[in-house]
Image (cartoon, helix red, strand yellow):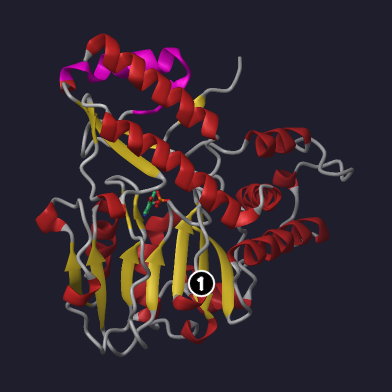
């Protein structure tokens, strides 16, 4: 069986070269006679794997020594509580920007620990655009401002980095981390669940400016204390070793592809092709303001919802998988992360054109 084009939002498609390398190294990692899965996390071999992954990520994303890089567990969702526990401090209040379902979940969790000021919200537009920063209602005394760079479900993505002055900027980059160049120095903390653009689910990468360490509330669970995790090289307990290894293979692959700059160019091209097609074909529609359309997740509807299941069946038959939209919004969604080759987008557009011609 050959590999299909998998448009799943997450866990998502991984580079074929990475999966093949993992397969080849599965039983015997480089002459050790062991799988990476079976190695002690304290062994020289695994520590070398872990260090290489961090080094490659730092190089790819341009992360300076002012930041700690943590390989944590519990997915991006665990960070929704880890962040307020560590960063609210004595201020007790944080700003949040609500652009969709994922920021909504982060907000709900933060409210359990302190005051949340909604600095801006996309709800008036039905989550199709992002309010101009001049109209935000920010609190100069906030402990931090949290936003979601790319709303994976709605397909709404920031095309600018909010300017928060001295207030640390915190970003959920789960679904667009490493998809284009980003100035990391603008951020206090960035986190990304791995299963969109980095590796297997469960792992979450946290990039935190070192001056934000050591501020956790005393009741913070040890496993959620950034200082503890940083002091122990993300090995306070047994880390998700195999996921960490696989993320490292993805980072190596990204470097071979030319890094985030080359990825950004390819991702822009893939997204432009697909949106251009949707915009010029009456049968399909995407509601998001052009400027804020996601490069990673492209939701679209058919002119007649009654044709959805037929569309999906036809797509499946061609090896175009997991195009069903999120259960909360319906319609379709094509996730076109770094590992989705341009040929996958071309095949999707070809199918969409044929389907519209026959059934439109
Ligand atoms: C997928 C996703 C999450 C949740 O990730 P989990 O690893 O399932 O907790 C959070 N935020 C964004 C933007 C996502 O895309």
In terms of depth relative to the viewer, which is nearer, 12 or 348?
A: 348
**Is residue 211 within the magenta segment?**
no
Q: Is residue 345 left or right of residue 330?
A: right
Q: Is residue 141 left or right of residue 182?
A: left
Q: Residue furthest right?
A: 31
Q: Is residue 156 left or right of residue 87?
A: left
Residue 233 shows in the view: yes
Q: Residue at left 55%, top 35%?
A: 341
**Is residue 308 within the magenta segment?**
yes
Residue 10 shows in the view: no
| Residue bounds of the magenta highlight | 306-323
Q: Which residue lies furthest to the front in this view?
A: 280
Q: Residue at left 37%, top 88%?
A: 166
Element on which disc 1 rests? helix
Across and down, in percent, residue 23 comes to 72, 33
Q: Quadrant of residue 153?
A: top left
Across and down, in percent, residue 221 comes to 43, 71
């Amino acid at each position: 069986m050959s590999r299909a084009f998998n448009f799943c939002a997450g866990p998502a498609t991984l580079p074929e070269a990475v999966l093949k390398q993992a397969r080849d190294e599965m039983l015997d990692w480089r002459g050790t006679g062991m799988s990476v899965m079976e190695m002690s996390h304290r062994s020289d071999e695994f520590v070398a794997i872990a260090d290489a992954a961090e080094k490659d990520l730092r190089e790819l994303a341009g992360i300076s020594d002012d930041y700690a890089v943590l390989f944590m567990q519990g997915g991006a969702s665990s960070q929704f509580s880890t962040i307020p526990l560590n960063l609210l401090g004595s201020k007790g209040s944080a700003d949040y920007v609500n652009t969709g379902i994922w920021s909504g979940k982060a907000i709900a969790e933060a409210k359990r620990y302190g005051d949340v000021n909604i600095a801006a919200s996309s709800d008036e537009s039905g989550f199709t655009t992002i309010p101009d920063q001049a109209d935000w209602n920010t609190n100069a005394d906030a402990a931090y401002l949290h936003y979601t760079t790319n709303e994976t479900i709605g397909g709404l993505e920031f095309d600018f980095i909010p300017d928060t002055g001295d207030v640390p900027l915190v970003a959920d980059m789960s679904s667009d981390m490493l998809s284009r160049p980003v100035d990391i120095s603008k951020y206090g903390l960035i986190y990304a669940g791995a299963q969109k653009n980095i590796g297997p689910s469960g792992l979450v990468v946290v990039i935190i400016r070192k001056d934000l360490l050591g501020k956790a509330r005393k009741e913070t669970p040890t496993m959620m204390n950034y200082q503890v995790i940083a002091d122990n090289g993300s090995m306070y307990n047994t880390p998700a070793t195999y996921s960490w290894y696989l993320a490292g293979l993805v980072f190596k692959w990204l470097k071979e592809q030319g890094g985030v700059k080359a990825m950004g160019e390819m991702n822009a091209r893939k997204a432009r092709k697909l949106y251009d097609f949707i915009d010029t074909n009456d049968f399909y529609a995407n509601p998001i303001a052009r400027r804020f359309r996601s490069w990673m997740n492209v939701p679209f509807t058919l002119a007649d919802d009654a044709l959805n299941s037929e569309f999906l069946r036809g797509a499946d038959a061609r090896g175009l998988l997991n195009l069903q939209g999120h259960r909360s919004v319906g319609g379709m969604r094509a996730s076109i992360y770094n590992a989705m080759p341009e040929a996958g987008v071309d095949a999707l557009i070809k199918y969409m054109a044929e389907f519209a011609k026959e059934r439109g």
